[in-house]
Image (cartoon, grey):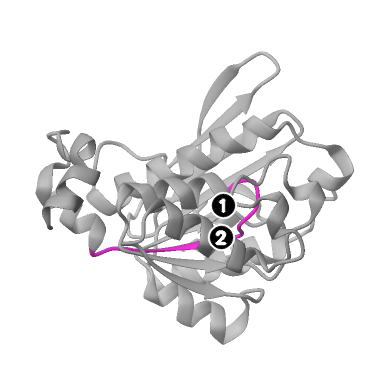
Amino acid sequence: MDDAQLLRYSRQIMLPQIDVAGQEKLRGSSVLIVGLGGLGSPAALYLAAAGVGHLLLADDDSVDLSNLQRQILHTQNNIGQAKTQSAIAALEAINPDTRLTAINSRLQGDVMETTVEQADVIVDASDNFATRFALNQACLKFSKPLVSGAVIRMEGQITVFDCRRADSPCYRCLYPDMVEIAETCSENGVLAPVVGIIGSIQATETIKLLLQLGNTLTGRLLLLDAMTMEWRNIALPRDPACPSCGQ
């Protein structure tokens, strides 16, 4: 790292758990973020700011006025642009050192598998169950850790599925039946800062996975009720009968 980079990341390098070696490891890492909306926005901003070397950004949507209440990557001037294009402009302004790859399509099939295979950690910030189940399968196939978050109304949840660990559940241990749940932000609403809270935790867990720091949320489901500002920490064991990861 040059002097400017040492200064940029100095507050992070001061942490004994990270130091210069950890910062270099972040610079050599790649993360796939699927969805650049309410969850993907803070996750992408913090991962770029923290110095992750390569972010793969996947979203097939365009910026809409209704997004701006919570999707902090995008601004009024980006309305009508592809979210990937808007995200790249915002992230380059935060940290020009981070390499950014835009995937302006819905990840599926061979494209999803090829993209998942490139990344060290996958952040699921998508808004539909079809993508979540497909991501889960791809992560299992290529042994990639998956950081999963979701928010509706004033409630959020986050967990980590790390199939490199024998005791880790997968997404289908949590949702065994591949049935779409008819609850979306457009139908039920969402409080803007709640997606920021969960998305920021997704970024934190991603950095911990990349640097092998502390205890991740693998095997635990963290639930937030923002109405009472209470957290619940629920054990999430691997299901031996899981149709995706069971024996």
Q: Nearer the N terminus, badge 2 or badge 1? A: 1
Q: Which residues are magenta?
A: 28-40
At which x and y percent is residue 221?
Answer: 52, 36
Q: Residue at x 58, y 30 (%)?
A: 223
Whether residue 158 is in magenta: the answer is no
Q: Position of residue 10 (x, y in %)?
A: 18, 39
Q: Residues within 10 Å of mark 2 (few under 14, many from 20)?
A: many
According to the image, label 2 marks what residue?
87
User: Which is in the foreground here, disc 2 or disc 1?
Assistant: 2
Determine the residue located farthest toward the front in the rendered image.
77
Q: Badge 1: few (under 14), some or many (20 or more) residues near its Cα, within 10 Å?
A: many
The picture quadrant where one finds residue 132 is bottom right
Q: Secondary structure at mark 1?
A: helix
Q: How many marks?
A: 2
Q: Is residue 229 above or below residue 171?
A: above
Was residue 39 drawn as part of the magenta stretch in this picture? yes
Distance between the alpha carbons at the discs numbered 2 and 1: 10 Å
Please name the residue shown 55% across and 86% down the image. 110
Mark 1 highlights which residue?
40
Q: Provide the secondary structure element on which disc 2 rests.
A: helix
